């Protein structure tokens, strides 16, 4: 590789060695890439005449919050250099990749979002002078010069292929942390590692970075095998547990995500008549919501569930290839992920005609009562698992009234019973944030068995699912499935329903739908 020092190169102090293919490599390829010019005259010509104005690089609001996050991390995992890869591009087909979404812990501690930045690495370690505070360095591949082959010939990194890449100085200004070229990562990771400083990496994100960390550990006498795996697992656990309580910036981003998601549900209602007309009406609903997610956010936070009729009984129905028929219910479970990667997670079960039938309303009201019971209980000091228990008491009571249980609700709620779970096999709540099922690697005592504290954000989402082929269910109820899901923030004395603007009561849903049509 050569260093580019041409005055036509982008910000010479930030210019990186080219990672683009050499002219010889381009010429030897048998695919369309071999059609790219490789002669020196072309390379000289394409390097000239570019306006190299640098766009503003304002400091991001999140940069006021990430230092405290990193400080908490090094206090939890002292005397350790912590390596957080962004992740790598994943192949969809041949030379086509899926859109890149960075790993959650990396985004949380760096303040990066959207598709920033494949193959990059954040390193967090204790400050040598103040071990309870952190020092962070971000390693990535900055913009290459116009005179590099990367600029015009590299479809992964090249500016003419994927757009302008930032310089080191730009990213440093935005994040407020030191930025260095990714080629310097190995030496930076190895420095001072040994008896006084351990080294570990977030597992399962980037195999090449994991291999590099394992090599450096071995060279510096750090244990491998179970000891190394244990350190990495504890790292993942600590990062998960730290996100259980959201800071002010996170709460603001969650509000944005919920608001955008509600706008998506409004568009879905407006498009229901078109969905009815189409053979794949569920795809019309999915496409409608996903368009809002891309327009107002980064993407959907998870695959949209648009389940009409009997499909609503399939908890994670994402094929969405069925019709939407008048008289049916359609269960829409969807969330907008905003640019900071925080996602909402809301579900409403909507009557396609705009009004619930008597049987649909009976099931809907039972689920709503279960949700209301969970809302009434949720407050600081209550254990997370108790929210589910409150909802299940209501679900079991209604199923007893429906005549579906082999005994009483009380008998079903006993550990040796649990018959009511046939019609609701999932939990009532999960934490929510950058991941739709956030903090999933947290220990049980920090999650299910933990007491609620202000700043936690989670869902309340009971349901009842009567499958079309369930012969224990009366025929008039078969194929009816209802879930109602809201996103809540624990406050000092209760919870705030972040999604309160999306109607919940059946009569309010009907009035809301009528107003949108």
Image (tube, helix red, strand yellow):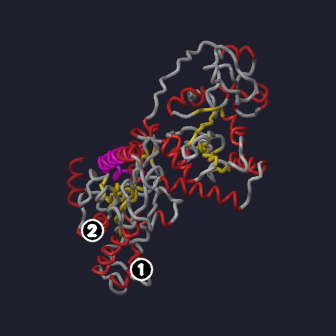
Q: Nearer the viewer, residue 158 or 376?
A: 376
241 on left or right of 472: right
Q: Nearer the viewer, residue 53 or 276?
A: 53
Q: Residue at x 59, y 41 (%)?
A: 127
Q: Nearer the viewer, residue 188 or 107?
A: 188
Residue 193 point in image, percent of width and height = 71, 46
Residue 67 point in image, percent of width and height = 50, 41
Q: Residue at x 64, y 50 (%)?
A: 201
> Answer yes or no: do the residues labelled 1 and 2 have beta carbons within 8 Å?
no
Q: For marks 1 and 2, give the CA distance.
A: 19 Å
The answer to whether one can see residue 101 in this image is no
The question of residue 276 being in magenta is answered with: yes
Question: What is the quadrant of residue 191 in the picture?
Answer: top right
The question of residue 15 being in magenta is answered with: no
Q: Nearer the viewer, residue 356 or 154?
A: 154
Placement of 124 over or under 436, stated as above or below: above
Name the disc covering residue 369, or none.
2
* Disc 1 secondary structure class: loop
- Which sits earlier in the primary sequence, circle 1 or circle 2? 2
* Residue annotated with mark 1: 418
Q: Residue at x 60, y 37 (%)?
A: 137
The segment highlighted magenta reads 256-279
Placement of 408 over or under 33, stated as above or below: below
- The residue at the far front in this view is 129
Placement of 411 over or under 93, stated as above or below: below
Residue 265 point in image, percent of width and height = 33, 49
339 on left or right of 260: right
Q: Residue at x 29, y 62 (%)?
A: 327
């Amino acid at each position: 590789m050569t260093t580019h020092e041409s005055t036509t190169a982008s910000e010479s102090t930030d210019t990186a060695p080219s990672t683009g293919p050499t002219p010889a490599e381009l010429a030897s390829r048998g695919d369309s890439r071999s059609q790219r010019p490789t002669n020196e005259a072309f390379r000289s010509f394409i390097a000239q005449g570019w306006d190299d104005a640098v766009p503003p690089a304002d400091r991001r609001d999140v940069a006021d919050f990430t230092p405290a996050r990193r400080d908490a991390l090094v206090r939890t995992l002292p005397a350790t250099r912590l390596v957080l890869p962004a992740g790598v591009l994943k192949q969809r087909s041949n030379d086509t990749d899926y859109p890149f979404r960075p790993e959650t812990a990396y985004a949380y501690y760096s303040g990066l979002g959207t598709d920033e930045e494949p193959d990059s690495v954040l390193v967090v370690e204790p400050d040598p002078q103040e071990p309870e505070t952190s020092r962070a360095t971000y390693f990535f591949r900055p913009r290459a010069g116009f005179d590099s082959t990367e600029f015009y010939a590299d479809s992964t990194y090249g500016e003419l292929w994927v757009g302008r890449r930032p310089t080191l100085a730009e990213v440093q200004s935005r994040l407020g942390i030191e930025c260095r070229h990714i080629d310097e990562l190995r030496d930076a990771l190895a420095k001072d590692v040994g008896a006084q400083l351990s080294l570990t990496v977030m597992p399962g994100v980037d195999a090449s970075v994991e291999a590099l960390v394992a090599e450096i550990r071995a060279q510096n006498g750090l244990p491998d095998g179970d000891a190394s795996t244990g350190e990495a697992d504890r790292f993942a656990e600590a990062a998960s547990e730290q996100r259980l309580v959201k800071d002010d910036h996170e709460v603001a981003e969650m509000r944005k995500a919920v608001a955008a998601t509600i706008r998506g549900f409004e568009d879905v209602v407006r498009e229901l008549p078109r969905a009815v007309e189409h053979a794949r009406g569920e795809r019309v609903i999915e496409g409608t919501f996903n368009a809002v997610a891309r327009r107002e956010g980064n993407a959907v936070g998870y695959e949209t569930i648009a389940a009409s009729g009997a499909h609503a009984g399939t908890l994670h129905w994402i094929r969405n290839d069925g019709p939407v028929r008048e008289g049916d219910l359609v269960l829409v479970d969807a969330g907008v992920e905003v640019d900071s990667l925080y996602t909402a997670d809301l579900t409403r079960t909507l009557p396609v005609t705009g009004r619930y039938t008597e049987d649909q309303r009976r099931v809907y009201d039972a689920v709503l009562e279960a949700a209301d019971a969970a809302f009434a209980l949720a407050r600081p000091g209550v254990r997370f698992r108790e929210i589910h228990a409150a909802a299940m008491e209501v679900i079991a009571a209604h199923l007893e009234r429906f005549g579906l249980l082999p005994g009483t609700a009380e008998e079903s709620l006993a550990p040796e019973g649990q018959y009511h779970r046939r019609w609701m096999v999932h939990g009532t709540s999960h934490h929510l944030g950058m991941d739709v099922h956030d903090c999933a690697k947290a220990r049980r005592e920090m999650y299910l068995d933990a007491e609620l504290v202000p700043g936690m954000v989670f869902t309340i989402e009971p349901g009842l699912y009567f499958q079309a082929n369930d012969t224990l269910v009366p025929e008039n109820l078969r194929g009816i499935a209802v879930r109602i899901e809201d996103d809540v923030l624990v406050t000092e004395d209760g919870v705030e329903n972040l999604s309160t603007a999306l109607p919940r009561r059946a009569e309010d849903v009907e009035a809301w739908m009528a107003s949108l049509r």
